[in-house]
Image (spheres, grey):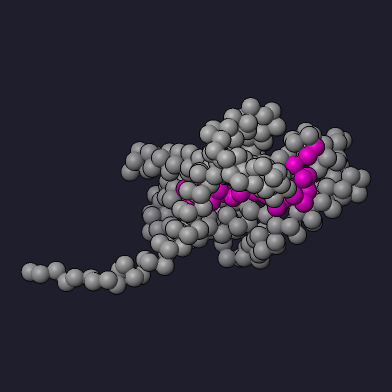
Amino acid sequence: MHKKRAGLLPYLLVAPTLVFVAVFTIYPTIASVIGSFYHHRLNILKYRTPRFYGLGNYHELFSSADFQQIIVNTLVYTIILVPLTIVVSFLFALWLRPKKFAPFRIAIFHPTILPAVSAATIWLFFFTPGYGLFNSFLSSLGYGGPQNWSSNPQLALFSLVIVAFWKDAGFYMIYFLAGLQNLPKDVYEALRLEGAHPFVVFFKFTLPLMRRTTLFVSTIAMVGAFRMVDHVIVITSGGPSNKSSLLLYDLWQERFENLNVGKSSAITVILILFLLVFTISNLLFNERKGVIHD
């Protein structure tokens, strides 16, 4: 029996995607890797023509106390924001799963549709010392600490976490909500008839069945955390004393303020490596959990 040949059609269908990935992902990545080995500054005449610099850009970055602080800021920001957002958005999805709570879904989702700059501007007003809504709310709960969130070295980074959490939790809730609504209803009906305890149902059935959705949400949340720059520009400008500067904001400063093409290329490569390590680790961890549960 002869198999029917597909011809050129499959290649023609994937060609637009391949071209898009090649032009907007592969080429910029290769160009950044190559550019990171050159001393290339557009605002200094003798360095306008790229000169081979070896690992000089990387050495300058990792020997700089400011860049080390930026790496720490980025890791702290990601490690706090991603788990917090995932857990709360999952709880929102569990709470709002019944149709009678549909209006609340809109209320929680609506910050997602705001542009990042608008959301940051709104929170600048909320963070206003003295009469800002956020500080007034905390004061009503008995909070008596510092209120200048965007200018306090101890609070500036957490102000970015709060704004990103407020904006993204509703977005991730939609994915979890879709996942919960697609769970097999006959399994839950059988568990209900057998009188299974809600904690057993949640930890032994719901969580394992939501593993694929959680993997997807955690991956896009992690990538989003490393790509944060809009809120930094509007709320803290990386200050005070570099305490809230993140990797992508530093990259933006080097490329567009300092016009240092070589160093910004090196930061791009470091950012890509961070994303690869976190994403692959997340995939392997979840796949391992899947093998254990299967």
Is residue 41 placed above or below 122 in the rendered structure? above
Is residue 220 placed above or below 66 in the rendered structure? below
* Residue 82 position in % (x across, y down): 59, 44
Q: Nearer the viewer, residue 158 or 200?
A: 158
- Quarter placement of the N terminus: bottom left
**Magenta region:** 213-240
Classify residue 22 as left or right of residue 244: left
* Residue 243 position in % (x across, y down): 74, 35
Classify residue 189 as left or right of residue 140: left
Residue at horizontal 54%, vertical 38%? 52
Classify residue 204 as left or right of residue 138: left
* Residue 145 position in % (x across, y down): 85, 34
288 inside magenta stretch: no
Whether residue 267 is visible, yes or no, is no
Whether residue 36 is visible, yes or no, is yes
Question: Hey, which residue is sitting farthest right in the picture?
Answer: 130
Is residue 24 placed above or below 289 in the rendered structure? below
Total count of labels: 0
